[in-house]
Image (spheres, grey):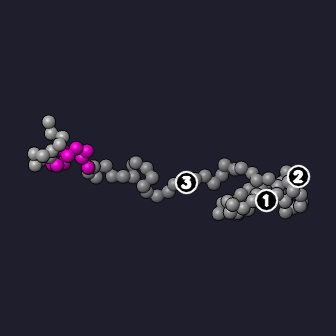
Amino acid sequence: MPTYQYRCADCGNELEVVQKMMDNALTKCPKCGKETLQRVISAEGGFVLKGSGFYGTDYSSSKSKPSSTPAASGGCSTGTCPFAK
């Protein structure tokens, strides 16, 4: 569940609350009791990819790639190749 930051526009109280994304935003400040609590948009908590498999450099270049033409892979060696001219 994500952590949301809130700040009271009246008293300046700041707090963090763990909520479901579907939950309504809080509006009542727990410190002063007024309905002036606002959700703060922060740049913290970015999305980070960790582990292997996310970058092109993670794959070995020594693996053989399949050929795109049947002739190169021996598919036309029988003489019935539709690509032969």
Query: Which range of residues does the magenta coloring cover?
Result: 66-75
Magenta: main secondary structure? loop
Q: Is residue 13 magenta?
A: no
Residue carrying label 3: 48
Label 1 element class: loop
Q: Quadrant of the N terminus?
A: bottom right
Residue closer to the observer: 77 or 67: 77
Q: Quadrant of the C terminus?
A: top left
For marks 2 and 1, the one nearer the N-term is: 2
For marks 1 and 3, the one nearer the N-term is: 1
**Residue type for callout 1:** Leu
Q: CA distance from mark 2 to mark 1?
A: 15 Å
Percent of width and height locating residue 35 = 87, 56
Q: Are marks 2 and 1 in contact (CB under 8 Å)?
A: no
For the point 36% across and 52% down, the residue is 59
* Numbered badge on residue 78: none
Task: In the rendered view, tell whether residue 7 sits above or below residue 83.
Answer: below
Label 2 element class: loop
Percent of width and height locating residue 14 = 79, 56
Q: CA distance from mark 2 to mark 3?
A: 35 Å
Mark in front: 2 vs 1 = 1
**Residue type for callout 3:** Val
For the point 84% across and 63% down, the residue is 30
Residue carrying label 1: 26
**Residue type for callout 2:** Asp
Residue carrying label 2: 10
Percent of width and height locating residue 68 = 25, 44
Quarter of the view holding residue 26: bottom right
For the point 26% across and 49% down, the residue is 66
